[in-house]
Image (tube, rainbow, N blue to C red):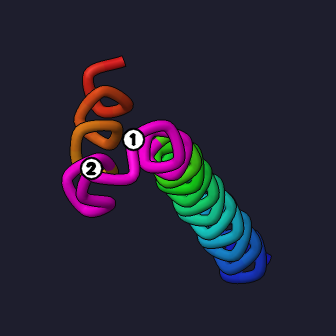
Amino acid sequence: MDSYDDDERELNRKKENAADDTKGGLEEMGDKMKSGAKAMGNKMKDTHKDMDTEYNKEKLKEDVD
């Protein structure tokens, strides 16, 4: 009986860890998309701006927030 309970607890802990990892990955992806969208908007306002530079500036702003 104890072995079954231990296995069930271990399985639940793994599920929670997987859910936390997925949530973190989704949040990171959302931040990247937001930074990219802002960079694209800045590029459209001023076509002389470098897209990579604008993305990195927006990414830094997101990291600070």
Is 11 located above or below residue 65 in the figure?
Answer: below
Q: Position of residue 38 (x, y in %)?
A: 51, 39
Which residue is found at the position 32% from the left and 60% from the top? Answer: 51
Is 31 located above or below residue 52 in the figure?
Answer: above
In 3D space, how far apart are the residues under numbered discs 1 and 2 (Cα atoms)?
A: 6 Å
Q: Position of residue 40 (x, y in %)?
A: 51, 52
- Amino acid type at circle 1 is Asp
Q: Give the range drawn in magenta.
A: 39-54
Q: Position of residue 65 (x, y in %)?
A: 36, 18
Q: How crowded is mark 2: few (under 14 residues within 10 Å), some or many (20 or more)?
A: some
Which residue is found at the position 29% from the left and 47% from the top? Answer: 54
Residue labelled with disc 2: 49
> Does residue 44 belong to the magenta stretch?
yes
Which residue is found at the position 58% from the left and 48% from the top? Answer: 37
> Of 39 and 8, which appears nearest the observer?
39
Residue labelled with disc 1: 46
> Of 13 and 55, which appears nearest the observer?
55
Helix, strand or loop under label 1 = loop
Marks 1/2 in contact by CB < 8 Å: the verdict is yes
